[in-house]
Amino acid sequence: MNVIDDLLLNILALTLPILLRHILVLDRPGPFRFNVSNRAFIGLICSLAAIFSMSHPFFTTTGNNFDLRTIPVLIAFLYGGIRSGLVVSAIILAYSYYVDGSDFLWIVTLSALLVPFILAFIALSNWKHLTPKVMFPSLLAFISALATFCMTMLYRIVSNVPVDKSFLLYGLMFCMVQMLTMWMLTYLIVRISENVAMRQEVQRSEKLNVLSELAASVAHEIRNPMTVARGFMQILSQSEVTEEKKRIYTTMVIEEIDRAQSIITDYLSFAKPQAEKLEKVDVSTLSLKLSNLINPYASMRGVEILIDMESSLMVNANSEKMIQCLVNLTKNGIEAMPSGGTLQITGFKKNAKVILQIKDNGVGMTPEQVNRLGTPFYSTKNKGTGLGMMVSYRIIKTFGGLIEVTSQPDQGTCFTISLPAV
């Protein structure tokens, strides 16, 4: 029973460095990753694992201890390179001399024969390009253990130490334990490496997908003003157009180009946000401009707009950005009522906050949809990009405010904007 306990303790000590390497080196983002080379880290943890294995052998016979020191050496050579493997081998020799100097010459001889064999086996096999990446280290561990056992048996014969059946049984079990332990550890290393590589590939694919969606959405948003500008330019090229109409059309072309430029500026603000020029704005006075902008669209879709604003609702904001945000939210409310309805816009002051509420009685949203509002490229509309809501959330956040959403399916949605009052 003690043999099994010691063996499990050794396996745990060998598994822990692999998990530490995964947690501290491979699994952390760049700014939080330990600033240490991969090979140096492997050499360090393998050296500690080898010392622990030598201090806790799982088989003990007359004159010999069987432990798993060979496995950290193999892992260092296979995954850390020649330098890491040689460092671990040197530390094993130094610790052996410290523990029992009488057998130091024999251990040096064993290492001098075993290390070149391991290096030759690795160099000639090109093992990393083989499909069964687990079988090769396991086979190498078995051969190394078998060679160690044979040389130990030769040493016992030369030293006139009897070689009995128990020693042979221990030797066979020693070789099998080495192979199975190496197979388990190698399988763990391969699976962790594959998972890390797969996750990095998924992250790279997600970034490319976001980039492609962003490019498509920018093109979609800019295409409308560019199409209008192109149409007016075609009209201006006709000779029968009067000077008055040319002046009007030229003004419209400039306005559409300015609108395209404003859209580009909004998109660039997410990559590199710029400080807004804030000033005292009376939100109640913006309701009239909002009504003029949104009423034609609401009438076309059979939606009645009711505005109830208290007077003198002063906040620090940018009036143009504030109107843009309110237009986005009211437009979404109108589109949420395909069969018509009522859109209520109210404004009041409460506890040093200016509260604006935009409430519709449309299709509503589920809690999951509400939680995803304001994220890039998410929209409850079939042809929506979700960028309007994202811009609105960013605008209110820039003003030091907050947008809260309450909604229930088939019962409507209420957007509540709270801003610090001046």
Image (tube, helix red, strand yellow):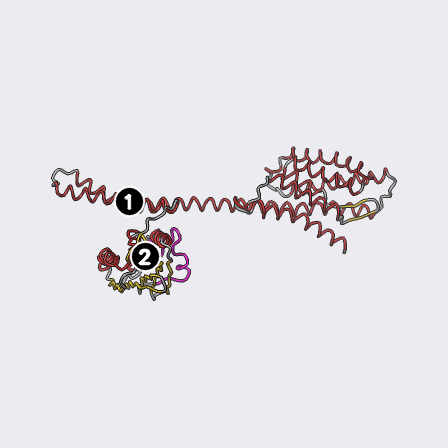
**Tag 1, which secondary structure?**
helix
Q: Which residue is mark 1?
A: 260
- Quick check: is 368 in the magenta stretch? yes
In the displayed structure, 255 sits above or below 82; it is below
- Quick check: is 232 in the magenta stretch? no
Rendering coords of residue 144 (x, y %): 72, 40
Q: Which residue is mark 2?
A: 315
Using residue 96 as the reference point, say whether residue 363 is left or right of it: left
Please, what is the three-letter code of the amino acid marked with disc 1? Ala
Q: Nearer the viewer, mark 2 or mark 1?
A: 2
Instruction: Name the magenta segment's main secondary structure.
Output: loop
Q: Quadrant of residue 355?
A: bottom left
> Who is closer to the viewer here, 30 or 200?
30
Quarter of the figure that contains the C terminus: bottom left
Residue 385 can be seen, yes or no? no
Cβ atoms under marks 2 and 1 closer than 8 Å: no
Q: Magenta segment range?
A: 364-382
Outermost residue, bottom side: 411
Residue under the point 29% across and 55% down:
281
**Tag 2, which secondary structure?**
strand
